[in-house]
Amino acid sequence: MTDLLVAENLCKWYGDYLALDQVSLTIPKGSIFGLLGPNGAGKTTLIRIINQITHPDEGRVLFNGTPLNRNHIKNIGYLPEERGLYKSMKVGEQALYLSQLKGLSHQDAKVRLQYWFDKFGISEWWGKKVQELSKGMAQKVQFIVTVLHEPELLIFDEPFSGFDPINANIIKDEILKLRDKGATVIFSTHRMESVEEMCDHIALLHNSKKILDGKLSAIKQAYKSNTYEIGLKHQQPEGLKTELAGLLTSEAVSFQVFEEELKLRVALKNGLGSRELLAALNERAELVYFKEVIPSANDIFIQKVNEQRKEEHGQA
Ligand SMILES: Nc1ncnc2c1ncn2[C@@H]1O[C@H](COP(=O)(O)OP(=O)(O)OP(=O)(O)O)[C@@H](O)[C@H]1O
């Protein structure tokens, strides 16, 4: 996979505050790239640089290998977190106006808008004023205007906020379809379940710095903690605890009896793996299930940010 966007050593100052500190990123073509981080980490600043709303003080961004310039604006669709349509303008009129700003002809924009309005079941709003729309309805219109010109890069900042679960699902499916048709997606959110469902790559920003990035599946593998969840039939915890003691660390150990089943969550000592654990268990009990615990994006976010905070406190 080649990279659509490469950011090299970006620095951005707001007065004497350094909002981005040597941030480098590579965004593979066709990926859904999650840009994550606590409030104030620098995500929006980075997105604004990619959109050329603001410019870096140091570093550069390459789009398809070329330094970012005004010609790339047509190739990018951006749905900002703060949504804004002109309230007194009519929906259709405004959608047409915004689409033409992205380089579409009036005729082409009209055909495409009609297609999307139909698809989202909102054709009857065409002649209404924006102020008559609910928040979710206005968001649908903005989503349409963001993707209408079929840009190579789509940037969504909290795309699901304000949508009910059904509409959020519709938007999610549309984003996945756009990716399948070849678009690259940058997706900034605090909703970790959306990251799990959609992102194949992530970058985590904290205090203006990138502290983690890569393929989500590889990051998950790297953050595994040799922990397993096991269900066993007809077992009591006491004997088993003593028997397994030699294999387990003192962390993440839980033994819970639930109806006929004993549920275990155990962390193995370094150097031991599923083979040793299974051998010890097989001697004793009938397995119902056995699985390695893979950390969630949420677990990884919390762990990495907390580690970073501790490190920064240590240095202070
Ligand atoms: N125009 C500005 N002038 C001064 N400071 C700014 C400006 N824009 C952002 N900042 C500061 O830069 C830092 C990064 O802000 P940014 O909006 O990029 O964070 P974010 O990661 O998007 O946060 P959130 O998750 O809360 O949206 C913050 O400390 C913010 O106060």
Image (tube, rainbow, N blue to C red):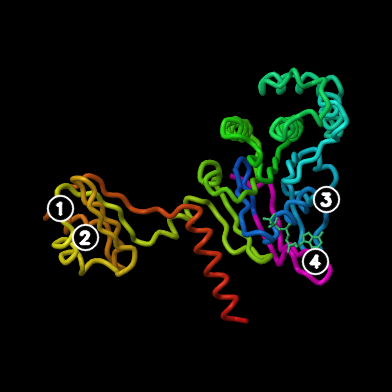
Give the distance between the C-alpha atoms of the residues marked 2 and 1, in whole angstroms: 19 Å
Residue linked to disc 1: 235
Ligand 1 quadrant in view: bottom right
Among the two numbered marks 3 and 4 on one chain, the one whose residue lies closer to the N terminus: 4
In the image, is residue 300 part of the stretch drawn in magenta? no
Helix, strand or loop for disc 2:
helix
Question: Contact (CB < 8 A) between labels 1 and 4?
Answer: no
Q: What stretch is highlighted in magenta?
A: 1-25
Where residue 246 appears, x then y in whole percent? Answer: 20, 69
Q: Nearer the viewer, residue 39 or 293?
A: 39
Give the distance between the C-alpha atoms of the residues marked 1 and 4, in whole angstroms: 61 Å
- Closer to us: mark 3 or mark 1? 1
* CA neighbours of label 3 inside 10 A, class few (<14), some (14 to 19), many (20+): few
Q: Could you tell me which residue is drawn at 83 percent across and 50 percent down?
A: 53
Above/below status of 155 relative to 124 = below
Question: Contact (CB < 8 A) between labels 4 and 2?
Answer: no
Helix, strand or loop for disc 3:
loop
Q: Could you tell me which residue is drawn at 80 percent across and 40 percent down?
A: 84
Where residue 89 appears, x then y in whole percent? Answer: 87, 29
Helix, strand or loop for disc 4:
strand
Among the two numbered marks 1 and 4 on one chain, the one whose residue lies closer to the N terminus: 4
Q: Could you tell me which residue is drawn at 83 percent across and 48 percent down?
A: 69
Q: In which quarter of the image is the C terminus?
A: bottom right
Question: Contact (CB < 8 A) between labels 2 and 3?
Answer: no
Q: In this view, does 153 lie to the left or right of 311?
A: right
**Amino acid at dot 3:** Ile
